[in-house]
Amino acid sequence: MPTKYALRINGQNVSVETEPDASLLMVLREQLDLTGTKYGCGEGQCGACTVLIDGRSVRSCLTPVSTISGKSIVTVEGLAKGDRLHPVQQAFLDEGAMQCAYCTSGMIMSAVGLLNTRENPSDAEILHFMQGNMCRCGTYPRIVAAIRKAGAAGKELVR
Amino acid sequence: MTTKTDLAAGLEPERYELHTPVSVIFESDRRGFFKFLGTGIFIVCAATKASALQESGRSGHNSEDNLPQEIDAWLHIGEKGEITVFTGKVEVGQNIRTSLSQAVAEELCVPIESIRLVMGDTQLVPFDMGTFGSRTTPVMNLQLRRVSAAARDALIALAAKQWDADAAHLTAANGKILDSQTNRSASYCDLVKGQQITQLLPAQDPLIPATQWKIAGQSVPKVDGRDFVTGKHRYPYDYKLPEMLHGKVVRPTSFGATLVSADTHAAEQMPGVTVVRDGNFLAVAAPTTADAEKAAASVKAEWKSDPQPSSQELFEYLKKNQTPGEERDSAYETGDVQKVLASSGHKLNSNFNISYIAHAPLEPRAAVAEWNGDQLTVWTGTQRPFGVRSELATAFHLPEEKVRVLMPDTGSGYGGKHTGDAALEAARLARAAKRPVKLVWTRLEEFTWAYFRPAGVIDVTSAVNADGTITAWEFHNYNSGAAGIRTYYDVPNQRIQFHPVNSPLRQGSYRALAATANHFAREVHMDEIAASLKMDPLQFRLNNLKNARLRAVFEQGGKQFGWVKPRAAHQGFGVGGGFEKLGYMATFVEVSLKPDTREIKLERVLTAFDCGAVVNPDGLRNQLIGANIMGIGGAMFEAIEFQDGRIVNNLFSKYRVPRFRDVPPMDTLLIDRKDQPSVGAGEAPILGIAPAIANAIFAVTGIPLRSLPMAPQLTAQGYKFS
């Protein structure tokens, strides 16, 4: 039964009508045209669909839209402040931490989620936290370097 | 087999690189296209046949009427100074948009930001076979440099004419022409204003030598990187059109199945749903993805299929099912292998098994198709936009000029996106629904209905003298392919043969093709010979190798790696190297073995690579390390399991690919040969990692590893690989 949901996405209140079991990923991409959040596997294995919900990184493909009313959702489109990129986005550019870049938005959102909870994480903490994000092009060492750099630069919380 | 020329001659056409025949490719409205771009300077780069014509005297300025019929690339400088370059090559993460832009910026003397590359749009770009075989850098980079140099010369000539000056005193820099005699200068846009010049590329055009490069040769960042970190870039999976429906294919229950019956009644009753049944193609289109999934699930289909081999019996099957009559396709013989093997006192034989693996690009296949009358437009992720155009034209009985394929920069391919499956499916549904249709594959579909890197069996037999000289080399590859099958070691007696097999699974190109399997077998067998002679494996290679550039990657890589350092008891070093797609590579690996837990760990990797003059050092390092990381998957744990015409491990939860923790410290050594042409780097760097790991583990355990992937054998023998 299609139901109306009031969501808060990237600081804006939006209303969507969908089945309660529809995934947040599908709602973002198909209803709100926020396609920066990617489909990669649909089973929470690759991390391409990662978004922030109340500041924590979450796999949007496994998140039913009925469970997130009233929570604050941030997608990769909502990270930059005007022209100024979030430090994690900037660090990915500075380190050239991408090839095809299809995984990049999920990597960035996971990294922001990590830095929200852990200031200046160690490499071991980065590896542990990022293990669920997949890059088939194999840019992992650069992604670690980018997160290390953004982490060392100080905290910029995103909720 | 020792000179550069001989090695290059060894680049045999690959059976599994999916080619399309080159046909007449120019649409009737080509002239209209030139008019569409308006005034400015066009520089056109002709392909071989047209170049020959031009060399025979038809050079110089051309009108639109006598443009050559075969064109490789072209460039346009508009009235606002905007530079647009048209190429059929596509961007799948190899960062070729950046390195090609560097080539143009260098020769045209403009900032890289002023260049826009139109890539892979079959209506706007010249015909191109596709982006594979590491051909973009050696061919297209050079073409664009030539086109850009010609454009620069045309601008100088224009300025000389306008100023009545001697062209010899004019130079180009930063988007301007400067007269050193009068200090007068003019920007490119001022010069081209009101002009309409179309010029064919001159036969002789001096290019800026690599030693004087200022933009090429530098670590320029990804040109549109910002669009990727902000989520702005739209991949094929993100494409969208007004009124668009979403498609879903009802897949057969097994490979090769035929549709016996289909009850589509329930789906047809759903609002806005279109059902298509066309032969074995059964699919639906609906207003949303959820609706399409629901409609597809409601279809009751009955499929019929024949018994098929499974992965358990794969290697036996491959040796028994050679395609008749094709055995001699790539046979290579020199000297007398049989005689030397029969008389030699020191012979070795090893047999290798190579599993099917999946490309598993993170972006699965996706397409959006739209019909306008009998004109079809498709946006899709493919390495062969013109090949997909051809597939669509054939499938829908259309002339090719009725089909336009556009390729937005795509979420990788690795050789896996040569075909237009999703494009065909979306187009078929769109024709029935009379609306644009988007069709995206799920991960399960990608793992099942795409094609795989071929599995194979390889038999190697060799003979060697006591002094470490290889005297005979016999090498048979069943099914995995002929790429990289020839040895670059100097052996007087050789017999090398590829045996095609009727593959049980759909197979096709994969990054470096069969060169990975062939390098694995060759380089592992080299270590086995060295061990049988108690010789150092690196020294043994060098004893049998004359090619200077290949020796250089082995020697310089070994030096940087610290190959001659004394090793601890539980520390193993391994090396694997070779020549492929014009690049020379050697990869060095260190592993450790914990004797108590029998745990084997990858400690570090170094790849030395020579691809001529380096166009973008940072981009090249990204490719080298990325290729090695991807290669760890195929080397250690990736293998497609199948049974009864179905893929068993058809999700990422069942098919392990390399992740963050699988990556040891990785280093690169770039041998920047500014005296040599630039060649590709997307493929060859993947070749060394598997044999280097195998050889390092062999060094520390004494266990020869002759299967890809290797982890299952290690597990079976009581070792743990982490």
Image (tube, coloured by chain):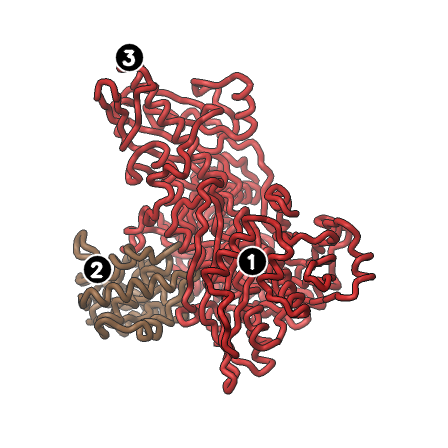
Chain colours: A brown, B red
Where does label 3 land, which residue?
A: B164
Q: Secondary structure at mark 1?
A: strand
Q: Nearer the viewer, residue B265 or B383?
A: B383
Q: CA distance from mark 2 to mark 3?
A: 53 Å
Q: Nearer the viewer, residue B65 or B610?
A: B610
Both marks 3 and 1 on one chain: yes
- What residue is at 25 percent from the left and 26 percent from the top? B187
The label number, if any, that marks residue B650 in the structure image: none
Q: Secondary structure at mark 2?
A: loop
Residue contact between numbered discs 1 and 2, judged by CB atoms under 8 Å: no
Left or right placement of residue A86 versus residue B416 in this view: left
Residue name at image x 26 percent, y 15 percent = B163
Residue A86: mark: 2
Other-residue count near label 2 (Cα within 10 Å), few / some / many at <14 / 14–19 / ≥20: many
Residue situated in front as seen by the camera: B453 or B431:
B453
The total number of labels drawn is 3
**Direction from residue A5 to residue B94 in the image, left or right:** right
Q: The residue under label 1 is which amino acid type?
A: Gly
Mark closer to the observer (2, 3): 3
- Which element carries disc 3, helix, strand or loop? loop
Q: CA–CA distance between discs 1 and 2?
A: 42 Å
Which residue is most to the bottom?
Answer: B596
Residue B377 x, y percent position in the rendering = 44, 42
User: x%, y% of residue B368?
Assistant: 42, 49
The amino acid pointed to by label 2 is: His
Residue B252 percent location from the top left of the image: 57, 63
First reached walking from the N terminus: tag 3 or tag 1: 3
Q: Tag 3: residue type?
A: Asp
Is residue B12 shown to the viewer in this render? Answer: no
Report in which chain the residue with disc 1 lies.
Answer: B
Task: Tell which tag, 1 or 2, sits nearer the viewer.
Answer: 1
Q: Which residue is mark 1?
A: B577
